[in-house]
């Protein structure tokens, strides 16, 4: 990896043209950004095709100020170039010259992207794991009370490991399940059928998105075994004691190495067995997520009438529990001070109610959904400078879209709600990269959700006013950032992406096993410096680009920027599915079409 650093230092120019390494859709805005580590000024650029002919330009390079390590940035807009092909972009001035890597324009550049992310999801599976061909965490788990005493054993093995640690959270897993189902609902043609239900190679007649969603659903059903018992988490950060492969997880929670792990239930009370406690106040944040996943699944799996009936009953029971116990059910910390500090629950109950309305057409669910939407019209991190860890989760509110999708008179208000959030981010995006999100931990999730909300807004309103910013967030994820790195491991093929992610699987088996994993992404320098236990284990090949207010390290030791995350990967799967396949209709679905499922 030092070779990259040497390349940087040996370059005759300190200016780097960053392009979207996946490529550009013909009808989308197309912009490359030059990040200069010195105060270089560029006047114009041209785009050359594969034969070296000028296909576009010369056009002016627009100086756009400094950003982080980039003393100057220039935006190079070639939106008008629409012809499918492979191109190179060359920018010139009196002194320096900067040339991009080869990039693509074409209608199918995102084909296969969503499926690529599912590789990562499969190797994160708890229960039967297809990467190892073996069952993992088969002794899950012991339901515990507030003091850690065992209440009973409950068979809850399954779900996905949350990141490079191996615990299972309903918060993130239910949201991931929902997003996979929604991706299939809205963009079924984006996914193939190359794997079976257990995640082994071989078609089974079912979209791989649904195979993966079903893995999540089956676990969620085990985690909500009766109408009054709602589990929220398996294991805790005592998991961090060992850096094992998931199949050899030797954590010991007091019942033996590799044996039972604790199961935490929603209780409405603060939880934490040691000095650190969360601030839980109710069930609704988790209950709403169960309800939305089950209610959408009941629609998607309608042909399996027995399964759909179970899902509908469970969705209604979860929603009722959320109504009875408003408030948040946060994840429980153990030895570490870090947990998911989710503070909002109206968003979750809104989505649950909206999907229950889509499923049942009972008007009281629509009224509930609308009231919850009014309680939190804008996801609060939009426009903010910072937020606590997972304070506003999910990262964007899918409920507004589902209310609109139900073809109700409230659809127009939902469009306004989304627009307010987008405008708040855009107001902060006056920089060369057109980026306005706060660089808190897991910034790639915020980037993905901003792009998704902007895409949903455009679909709902037919207003393309914010498309430049929507595209800038997508481009950022795939290389238009100071480091020139795609934030998805192994994607695109031939791109520049992390080789040393924070993961025992990658360090022991090779980075290829993490194909499709979305990284946390860059963070404010202050966050990187203040998190505990981060130590780079190799020289920083990106050191010249880590001099500004945000940092990113391709290093095994940096869990703040270089750890792949399960929920972020599922979040991006929806966006990539949308980019791979234009929606069949940009209009709200009519009631009749929903009923005919
Ligand atoms: Ca399949
Ligand atoms: Ca929430």
Image (tube, grey):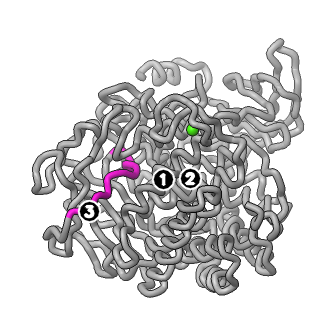
- Whether pointer 1 and pointer 2 mark residues with C-beta atoms closer than 8 Å, the reply is yes
Please determine whether, in this image, residue 305 is positioned above or below residue 94: below
In this rendering, position of residue 506 left or right of residue 569: left
In this rendering, position of residue 21 left or right of residue 106: left
Q: Which residues are magenta?
A: 153-164
Mark 3 or mark 2, earlier in chain = 3
Q: In percent of the image, x 60 and y 42: which residue is there? A: 206
Q: Is residue 159 magenta?
A: yes
- Whether pointer 1 and pointer 3 mark residues with C-beta atoms closer than 8 Å, the reply is no
**Distance between the Cα atoms at labels 1 and 2?**
6 Å
Name the secondary structure under disc 1.
Answer: helix
* Residue 571 numbered mark, or none: 2
Q: Nearer the viewer, residue 499 or 144?
A: 144
Disc 2 C-beta below 8 A from ligand 2: no
Q: Nearer the viewer, residue 306 or 431?
A: 306
**Distance between the Cα atoms at labels 3 and 2?**
29 Å
Please determine whether, in this image, residue 162 is positioned above or below residue 592: above
In the image as oriented, which residue stretches furthest toward the top?
51
Q: In percent of the image, x 36 and y 82: which residue is there? A: 281
Decide: few, some or many residues near mark 1? Use Cα within 10 Å; few <14, some 14-19, many ≥20.
many
User: What residue would you read off at disc 3?
Assistant: 154
* Residue 567 numbered mark, or none: 1
Mark 1 or mark 3, earlier in chain = 3
Please determine whether, in this image, residue 178 is positioned above or below residue 496: below
Please determine whether, in this image, residue 200 is positioned above or below residue 530: above
Name the secondary structure under disc 2.
Answer: helix
Residue 233: percent from the left, percent from the top?
Answer: 33, 62
């Amino acid at each position: 990896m030092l070779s990259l650093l040497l390349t940087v230092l040996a370059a005759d120019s300190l200016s780097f043209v960053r392009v979207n390494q996946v490529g550009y859709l013909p009808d989308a805005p197309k912009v490359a950004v030059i990040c200069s580590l010195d105060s270089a000024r560029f006047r114009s650029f041209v785009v050359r095709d594969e034969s070296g002919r000028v296909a576009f330009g010369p056009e002016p390079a627009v100086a756009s100020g400094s950003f982080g390590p980039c003393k100057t940035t220039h935006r190079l807009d070639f939106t008008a170039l629409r012809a499918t092909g492979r191109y190179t972009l060359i920018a010139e001035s009196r002194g320096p010259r900067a040339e991009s890597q080869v990039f693509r324009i074409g209608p199918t550049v995102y084909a296969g992207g969503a499926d690529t992310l599912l590789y990562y999801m499969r190797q994160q599976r708890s229960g039967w794991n297809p990467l190892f061909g073996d069952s993992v965490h088969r002794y899950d788990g012991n339901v515990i009370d507030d003091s850690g005493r065992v209440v009973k054993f409950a068979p809850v093995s399954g779900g996905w490991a949350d990141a490079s640690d191996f615990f299972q959270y309903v918060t993130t897993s239910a949201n991931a399940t929902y997003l996979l189902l929604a991706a299939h609902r809205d963009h079924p043609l984006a996914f193939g059928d190359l794997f079976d239900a257990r995640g082994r190679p071989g078609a089974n007649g079912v979209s791989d998105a649904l195979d993966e969603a079903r893995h999540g659903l089956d676990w969620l059903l085990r985690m909500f075994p009766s109408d009054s018992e709602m589990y929220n988490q398996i294991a805790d950060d005592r998991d961090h004691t060992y850096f094992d492969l998931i199949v050899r997880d030797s954590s010991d929670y007091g019942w033996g190495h590799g044996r039972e792990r604790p199961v935490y239930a929603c209780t409405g009370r603060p939880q934490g067995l040691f000095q650190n406690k969360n601030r839980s106040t109710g069930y609704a944040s988790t209950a709403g997520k169960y309800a939305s996943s089950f209610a959408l699944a009941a629609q998607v799996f309608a042909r399996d009438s027995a399964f759909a009936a179970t899902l509908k009953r469970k969705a209604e029971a979860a929603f009722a529990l959320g109504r009875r116990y408003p408030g948040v059910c946060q994840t429980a910390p153990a030895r570490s001070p870090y947990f998911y500090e989710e503070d909002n629950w109206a968003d979750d109950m809104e989505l649950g109610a909206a999907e229950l309305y889509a499923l049942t057409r009972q008007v009281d669910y629509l009224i509930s959904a609308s009231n919850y939407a009014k309680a939190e019209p804008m996801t609060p991190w939009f426009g903010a400078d910072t937020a606590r860890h997972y304070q506003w989760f999910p990262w964007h509110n899918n409920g507004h879209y589902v209310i609109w999708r139900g073809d109700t008179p409230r659809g127009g208000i939902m469009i306004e709600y989304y627009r307010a959030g987008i405008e708040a981010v855009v107001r902060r995006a006056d920089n060369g990269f057109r980026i306005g999100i706060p660089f808190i931990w897991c910034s790639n999730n915020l980037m993905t959700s901003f792009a998704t909300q902007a895409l949903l807004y455009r679909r709902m309103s037919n207003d393309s006013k914010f498309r430049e910013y929507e595209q800038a967030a997508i481009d950022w994820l795939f290389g238009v950032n100071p480091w020139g790195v795609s934030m998805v491991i192994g994607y695109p093929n031939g791109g520049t992406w992390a080789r040393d992610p924070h993961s025992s699987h990658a360090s022991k088996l090779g980075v290829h096993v993490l194909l499709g994993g979305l990284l946390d992404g860059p963070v404010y320098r202050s966050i990187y410096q203040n998190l505990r236990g981060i130590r780079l284990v190799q020289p920083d090949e990106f050191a010249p680009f880590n001099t500004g207010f945000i940092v990113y390290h391709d290093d095994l030791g940096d869990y703040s920027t270089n750890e792949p995350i399960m929920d972020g990967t599922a979040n991006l799967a929806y966006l990539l599915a949308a980019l791979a396949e234009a929606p069949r209709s940009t209009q709200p679905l009519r009631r009749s079409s929903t009923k005919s499922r």
